[in-house]
Image (cartoon, rainbow, N blue to C red):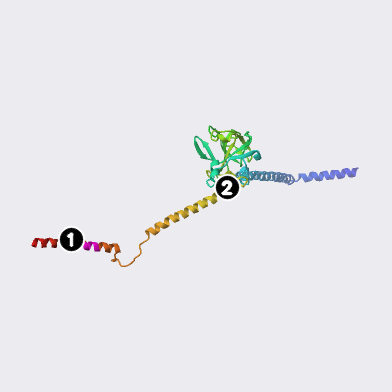
Amino acid sequence: MREEEKKRTSQNSKIQQFFRKRWVFPAIYLMSAAVILTAVLWYQSISNNVAEDLNTSEEDAMNDPEAVEVNALKENVAMPALDPDAVNVVKKFYDPNASTEDQEAALVFYDNSYRMNKGIDIAKEDQTEFDVVASLSGTVTKAEKDPILGYVVEIEHENDLVTVYQSLAEASVQAGDKVEQKELIGKAGKNLFNEEDGIHVHFEIRQNGTAINPLTFMDKPVTSIEEATQEEAANEEMIQEEAETSEEAPKEDAEAPKEDTGSETEESPEAEKDAEKGETEGAEQSSEPEASNQSLNS
């Protein structure tokens, strides 16, 4: 027992002697400070990485197009009815290249005059109301009631493309709303402009402000509209250039210098005839005084 007590006493004395050394406590303080500083730096590093990730994600969200716009570029033009199989096109778009019969069927009679239909009119066979939906995703720029056209909704899309919905009994959206394709925007109704079609929705597609035939692009990618418009514009420009070239050609022929057919003193046959005529008349005039002199002498 005494030996164990001696050992313990010797160990305690060694520990006490160790802690009595001057460099022990400063070393402990330095080690503790290093550990704390390392922990603080590690925490700050993690916080900075998290903040950078958040900022990067926010910047990417700001720089990247909105989800609606990205999806819109991949969409196909859809019939603006919740149940497209339940509706029919009762009046088509007025096509200048269509037959006379089709053109007459695409006229709207209003205010004692016929007007060309700038879109298509869609209705149910039983003339009941139906839900009207957005043909493409976009931003609503107009949603108001017109005394002649009924409720009118206009939706703006990418590349200066606009879809128009008229003759609505009510509108479920307002200006500034972002809508997805096939999202409800109103219900079909009647209007004064085209009373003969009854309950219907008038649907238009406008590219750069010009109405185009919706049936031409129905169920086709929305990008095909811009491609077709660009191709048509290029063809019109080519036709105009050819017309200007053909107009300039006659002017150049008319302004071309006359060919030199001989010496500068050579006269035309008509000029020679005029000269001979003048000589004959001069001879006759010179003979008249001689005749008068002879009569006087006699």
Query: What residue lies at 51% left-to-right and 38% top-to-bottom?
Result: 114
Which quadrant of the figure has residue 268? bottom left
Q: Tell me residue 190's x, y (percent).
A: 58, 33
Which is nearer the eye, 113 or 290? 290
Residue 82: quarter of image = top right
- Mark 1 is surrounded, within 10 Å at the Cα level, by few (under 14), some (14 to 19) or many (20 or more) other residues, namely few
Circles 1, 2 touching at the beta carbon (< 8 Å): no
Is residue 288 visible in this depiction of the protein?
A: yes
Count of residue discs? 2
- Residue 200 belongs to magenta span: no
Which quadrant of the figure contains the C terminus? bottom left
Rendered image: mark on residue 106: none
Q: Label 2: which residue?
A: 225
Q: Which residue is identified by label 1?
A: 285
Q: Quadrant of residue 9?
A: top right
Residue at 87 percent across and 44 percent down: it is 6
Label 2, secondary structure: give it. helix
Density class for disc 2 (Cα within 10 Å; few <14, some 14-19, many ≥20) is many
Whether residue 278 is in magenta: the answer is yes
Q: Position of residue 246 (x, y in %)?
A: 44, 56
Spatial CA distance of label 1 from label 2 is 86 Å
Q: Which residues are magenta?
A: 276-280
Q: Nearer the viewer, residue 179 or 211?
A: 211
Q: Amino acid at mark 2?
A: Ile
Q: Is residue 284 left or right of residue 211?
A: left
Depth check: give the residue in front, 56 or 174: 174
Is residue 118 visible in the rendered structure shown here?
A: no
Secondary structure of the residue carrying numbered label 1: helix
Tell me the kind of residue under disc 1.
Gln
Q: Main secondary structure of the magenta part?
A: helix
Tell which tag, 1 or 2, sits nearer the viewer. Answer: 1
Residue 284 percent coordinates (x, y): 19, 62
